[in-house]
Image (spheres, rainbow, N blue to C red):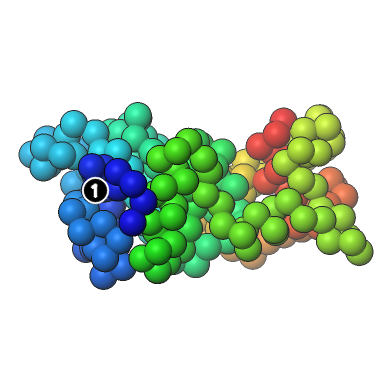
Amino acid sequence: MPANSESQTHLFISKTGRLLETWHGAFPHAISVPTDQLADTELPIQVLIAPSCVWLRLSTDMTVALQIAAVRARFPESHLVVMSDIPNDLEALAAFSVAARGYCNSHAGVEVLRNVANVVRQGGLWIGESIMQRLLTLPSAAPELTPATAQSVQPDWDQTLTEREREVAHAIAEGASNRDIASALQITERTVKAHVSAILEKLHIKSRLQLALIVKNR
């Protein structure tokens, strides 16, 4: 176990508030809180004085940005690690764009969790090899935008889109799924897909990840 990990307070926030066996195995003294009790003033004292590391297990009930915002409002100074049951590029991008320090699988093993905590505690970012490769490696046949180059590409990208398409683009950049967008905008998922296709065609890009990078780096 990394040095000083025992002296750290690890708070796990999830919809059920249940500690998975691997979480408890990595941090035997960890505390778990259900998402809907995050604003409770009667939380354990270790939580009220701000935990060293907060682990947020994402749910499908709301966007990544909204879930992180709720945690950040309560624990602005704690290191935040976002956990996903099914990690993906857009979620990772959305998490890091709002100052998460780590992003990993909710079911990561004990040693991985300890490594994540150690890296984050020392001021680093934990992205994970597979996500890093997809975010930063360019396919030779169809080059993708990287965070480093997206800033210089299409600074006026939104001028070519309709108002509704801009809404969809910004929602995608926040990690929203087609279902999330359809619900928020009160349109059908089929209509969302049509908007996404139109956006990609107008901007001459090939993926939602490229779109998210352009929006985030404007």
Residue named by callout 1: 6
Q: Which one is nearer the viewer's eye here, 78 or 98?
A: 78
Determine which quarter of the picture holds residue 196: bottom right
Horizontal side of residue 108 vs 187, given as left or right: left
Q: Secondary structure at mark 1?
A: helix
Looking at the rendered image, the quarter that the N terminus falls into is: bottom left
Determine which quarter of the picture holds residue 14: bottom left
Horizontal side of residue 6 vs 71, given as left or right: left
Counting from the top left corner in percent of width and height, residue 172 is at 61, 49
Amino acid bearing label 1: Glu
Q: Residue furthest left?
A: 42
Looking at the rendered image, the quarter that the C terminus falls into is: top right
Q: Residue at x 61, y 60 (%)?
A: 129
Q: Which one is nearer the viewer's eye here, 5 or 106?
A: 5
Observer able to see residue 186: no
Q: Residue at x 41, y 47 (%)?
A: 118
Say above or below: 202 vs 218.
Answer: below
